[in-house]
C-alpha cells in the first residue's frame, strides 16, 4: 500500500473512535478498581456516586436505577448493555468500528478484539464484588494493554495511524480532567492532620487511577500538596496521561498530516491546541486552584470537545458534533452511528 494513498474519511473516523472507546475502557476499569480500594467505610455511596458524576451519567443512571449505590453503579458500568459509557457499551463501540476497518487493521488486532469482546460480554454478577472485582478490572486493563501492544506492532504507519493516536490522546486528556474535576474538592485537605491522611490514601488513589503514582513520587517533594498533584496531571511534560503531553502529541500528529500528507484542515485544530496549551502553562497550579479549579477544568473539557469537533469537521465523512452542553461534563460522540458503505477520501 502506498503511504501517500488517500484514506477514506469513514476509515479515519472509525480509527479515531475505536481508539477512544478502547482508552475509555481502560480508564473505567482503573476508576472502578480504585473506587473499591479506597472507598471509606460509611461513605460507600458517595464514592460510587463520584464515578457516575465523572461520566455525566446522573440523569440516565437515575432513570434506570434510582439512587446511586455500590451495587447498582457496578451493574451500570460493568453489565449494562444500554449505557454507552459502560464496559460493554465501550467494547461494543470499539468492535463496531473495527468491523468497518477490516481492510486496514491486522488480523491480530481483529482476533484479539473479538476475543476480548466475547470475554466482556460473559462477565457475571458474582464478579462484581470483593477480590473478584479487582481481578476483573485487572483483566480489562490487561486486555486493553494487549490491544495497544498489538496495534503498536502491526498497524501501518500511514494517515490512519495518526487518526488512531489522536483519538486515544484526546480521550485520555478528557478522562484526566474529569477525574481531577470530580475528585479534587473531596480530596482537598482541611488541616494538617487531614492533609497527611489524604496524602497516604486518597491522593494516592487518584494518582493510581491514572497509573501515575510511581511517576509522581519520582518528582514530587516529600511534603507534596494538592497543587503538586494538579500540576502533575495537567502540565507535566513527561507523564503520558497529563493533559499537556496529550495535547503536544496530538499537535505532532496533526502537523504530520499537514507536512507529510499535505492535508488541509489542520489550521483550526492546531490553533485550538495552541490556545489550550497556553491556558495550561500561563498560570501556576496554585493560581488555578485559587481562581477556581472546577471552572478551569470545565473550560478545558469544553475545549477538548471543540478540538474533537474541529478534527471531525475537517476530516470525517459527515461530522455532526453535538452542541456544547451548558456544563462540559458530557462526552462527545458516545454512540457510533451507522456507517455508510462509501465515504469521501482524505487527500490533499
Image (cartoon, grey):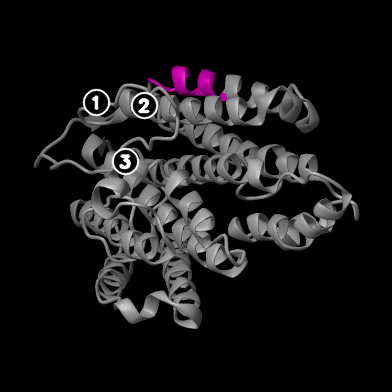
At horizontal 39% and vertical 35% (from top left) the residue drawn is 330
Give the x, y percent position of residue 317. Answer: 21, 30
- The disc at residue 320 is 1
Pointer 1 with pointer 2, Cβ within 8 A:
no
Mark 2 lies on a secondary structure that is helix
Q: CA distance from mark 1 to mark 2?
A: 8 Å
Mark 3, other Cα within 10 Å: few <14 / some 14–19 / many ≥20:
few
Is 271 contained in the magenta span?
Answer: yes
Residue occupied by mark 3 = 59
Pointer 2 with pointer 3, Cβ within 8 A:
no
Q: Is residue 124 above or below residue 206?
A: below
Give the x, y percent position of residue 258. Answer: 45, 27
Q: Over which residues does the magenta segment extend?
A: 265-273
Mark 1, other Cα within 10 Å: few <14 / some 14–19 / many ≥20:
few
Viewport quadrant of the C terminus: top left
Residue farthest to the front, as pictured: 42
Residue 212 can be seen, yes or no: no
Give the x, y percent position of residue 166. Answer: 45, 40
Location of residue 38 by image quarter: bottom right
At horizontal 46% and vertical 33% (from top left) the residue drawn is 260
Is tag 1's residue or tag 2's residue first in the polypeptide sequence? Answer: 2
Residue occupied by mark 2 = 309
Return the residue nearer the eye: 123 or 107: 123
Amino acid at each position: 500500500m502506498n503511504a501517500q494513498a488517500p484514506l477514506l474519511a469513514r476509515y479515519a473516523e472509525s480509527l479515531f473512535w475505536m481508539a477512544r472507546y478502547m482508552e475509555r475502557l481502560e480508564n473505567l476499569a482503573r476508576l472502578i478498581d480504585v473506587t473499591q480500594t479506597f472507598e471509606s467505610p460509611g461513605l460507600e455511596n458517595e464514592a460510587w456516586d463520584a464515578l457516575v458524576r465523572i461520566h455525566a451519567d446522573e440523569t440516565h443512571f437515575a432513570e434506570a436505577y434510582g439512587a446511586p449505590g455500590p451495587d447498582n453503579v457496578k451493574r451500570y458500568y460493568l453489565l449494562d448493555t444500554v449505557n454507552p459509557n459502560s464496559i460493554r457499551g465501550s467494547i461494543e463501540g470499539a468492535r463496531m468500528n473495527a468491523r468497518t476497518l477490516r481492510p486496514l487493521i491486522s488480523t491480530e488486532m481483529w482476533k484479539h478484539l473479538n476475543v476480548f469482546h466475547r470475554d466482556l460480554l460473559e462477565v457475571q454478577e458474582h464478579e462484581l464484588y470483593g477480590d473478584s472485582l479487582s481481578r476483573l478490572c485487572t483483566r480489562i486493563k490487561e486486555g486493553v494493554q494487549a490491544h495497544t501492544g498489538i496495534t503498536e506492532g502491526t498497524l501501518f504507519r500511514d494517515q490512519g495511524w495518526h487518526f488512531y493516536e489522536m483519538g486515544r490522546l484526546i480521550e485520555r486528556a478528557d478522562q484526566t480532567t474529569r477525574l481531577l474535576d470530580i475528585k479534587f474538592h473531596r480530596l482537598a485537605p482541611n488541616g494538617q492532620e487531614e492533609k497527611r491522611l489524604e496524602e497516604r490514601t486518597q491522593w494516592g488513589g487518584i494518582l493510581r487511577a491514572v497509573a501515575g503514582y510511581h511517576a509522581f513520587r519520582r518528582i514530587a517533594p516529600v511534603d507534596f500538596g494538592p497543587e503538586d498533584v494538579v500540576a502533575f496531571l495537567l502540565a507535566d511534560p513527561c507523564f503520558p496521561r497529563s493533559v499537556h503531553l496529550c495535547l503536544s502529541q496530538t499537535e505532532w500528529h496533526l502537523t504530520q498530516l499537514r507536512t507529510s500528507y499535505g492535508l488541509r484542515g489542520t489550521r483550526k485544530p492546531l490553533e485550538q491546541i495552541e490556545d489550550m496549551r497556553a491556558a495550561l502553562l500561563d498560570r501556576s497550579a496554585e493560581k488555578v486552584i485559587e481562581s477556581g479549579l472546577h471552572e478551569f477544568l470545565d473550560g478545558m473539557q469544553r475545549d477538548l470537545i471543540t478540538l474533537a469537533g474541529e478534527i471531525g469537521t475537517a476530516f470525517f465523512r459527515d461530522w455532526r458534533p453535538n452542541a456544547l452542553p451548558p456544563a462540559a461534563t458530557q462526552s462527545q460522540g458516545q454512540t457510533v452511528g451507522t456507517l455508510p458503505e462509501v465515504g469521501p477520501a482524505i487527500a490533499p
